[in-house]
Image (cartoon, grey):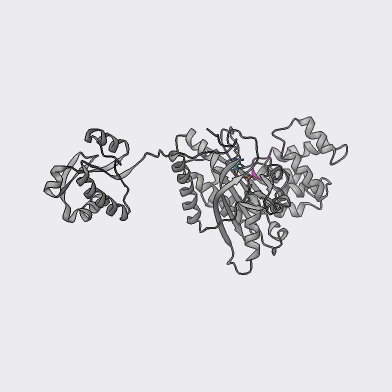
Amino acid sequence: MIETLPGFRQFYPEDCAARNYLFSIWRRVAVSFGFQEIDGPQLEPLELFTEKSGEEIVGQLFNFTDKGERNVSLRPELTPRVAVMAGSKANALRKPVKWFSLGEMFRYEKPQKGRLRSFYQLNVDLFGEENCSADAEVMGLCISILKSFGLTDKDVVLRLSDRTLWLHCLNGWGLDEASALRCLTVIDKVERVERSELVKQLDGIMTGKGDWLLESAEGLLKIKSLSELDGFVAKHFSGTEHAAVLAARIEEWRYLLKSFEDMGLSDFVQVDFSIVRGLAYYTGFVFEVFDRAGESRALAGGGRYNHLVRKMGGPDLPAVGFGMGDVTLRNLLEEKGLMATFADTLDCYVIYNGEESRTEALCDIMRLRELGFSVDYPLKGGNFGKLFKTANQRGARFVLIYGPDELEKNVVKVKEMLAGREQELHREHFIEMMAQLIRG
Ligand code: HAM
């Protein structure tokens, strides 16, 4: 048998049910926050991603030349497309624009626990509001979704960081913007790469000062609270020309953290400057969500990206958003015993005996199905004992029996499986009565 490609999945009924369960919560909570659903194409012009997504994703593209000699790629993420969609109708759209989307993404990554080559992602994006109340709304939604799955602040944590503050600090330490951005890509690796290697890379950015730069950065990386941040900024920058912009930024931090308090979500949020995000377009607050045990890859990640819409050819339109994948989320829910179980269920299972009964049964089956009930029956009939067993396995609430005796009396015998109750319903009003029984 031909296997799937590495990192791609087949979805058996229980997997589809699990996926639909994730989708239903994603959709329900996003709608409850006033977001509207959108989608884009799965196959895109290659340049949509090569220009704007950043090195890491570009190295993971599933790209090829199509039969019309176009360079195309399966989408690794939705953000550049959403930025184009928002930008091209920006004037007509009511602000803030609140959009979400559920869809399949493709990245040529090394398949491993929590990371595949095809996965589903919820994308949430808010356009047209610069104030960090928008960041609070988006992160609030991210946490609320996880809460709706039954996860608590003991299970997951949103690690909150800030590229703006990083850039102000790096600037204060003597780096111009381009060098500061390069420096952030090094800091992004702090948890994975040896210190000596980091120093070497930073030396390449600020000759001979790699060690000093890393030490200064480590001060910021250690910070876990707003008061520590206050202290850090006072120590490094008070009396300098950078003090004012940093003080203004800390006020935005204060406002954002207060919003989490007001939403009752503070315990989910941890200040953590080690998050800088690999994607090139982020400009301000950035975040990732992890399980508290810190064992798996990120459950979600996002942040502010105020310049992407303009870079895609649209007007100036501030934006903030996040993506949440299905793979790590399902793993975590299973580990915590929070994944709902998805048994096969039916409203009715119909059993019959002989051709004449089959004719009567089929007629009723079709009418019940038209009313929207789930009804199934053995295609080839069979032994009543065995068929009752099947009805049980299928989770049928009612078994409808069409035997010769019932035919003779013009009734259907209805057995309510859970209560073990049996009754005969006359065929004349059978469908109406059965519908009432099912609806309870
Ligand atoms: P990202 O951090 O690349 O952000 O992905 C977001 C989430 O998608 C991850 O936290 C993870 O749950 C899931 N994910 C990513 N790659 C894989 C993979 N190979 N296998 C399984 N799951 C994966 C973005 O994609 C941004 N576009 C999010 C965003 C939206 N930012 C603003 N708006």
Question: Bounds of the magenta span?
Answer: 222-226
Q: Position of residue 88 (x, y in %)?
A: 65, 64
Residue closer to the observer: 269 or 348? 348
Residue closer to the observer: 307 or 132? 307
Q: Position of residue 208 (x, y in %)?
A: 88, 36
Residue 276 in view (yes/no): no
Q: Is residue 410 magenta?
A: no
Residue drawn at 56 percent across, 56 percent down = 39
Residue drawn at 18 percent across, 41 percent down = 421
Q: Position of residue 133 (x, y in %)?
A: 60, 57
Q: Which picture quadrant has residue 309?
A: bottom right
Q: On the picture, is 384 further left or further right than 213?
A: left
Residue 438 in view (yes/no): yes
Quadrant observed for ligand 1 in the rendered image: top right
Q: Which picture quadrant has residue 342?
A: top left
Q: Position of residue 108 (x, y in %)?
A: 65, 40
**Image vertical order of residue 317 relative to residue 67, above or below:** below
Magenta region, mostly helix, strand or loop?
loop
Residue drawn at 71 percent across, 57 percent down = 307
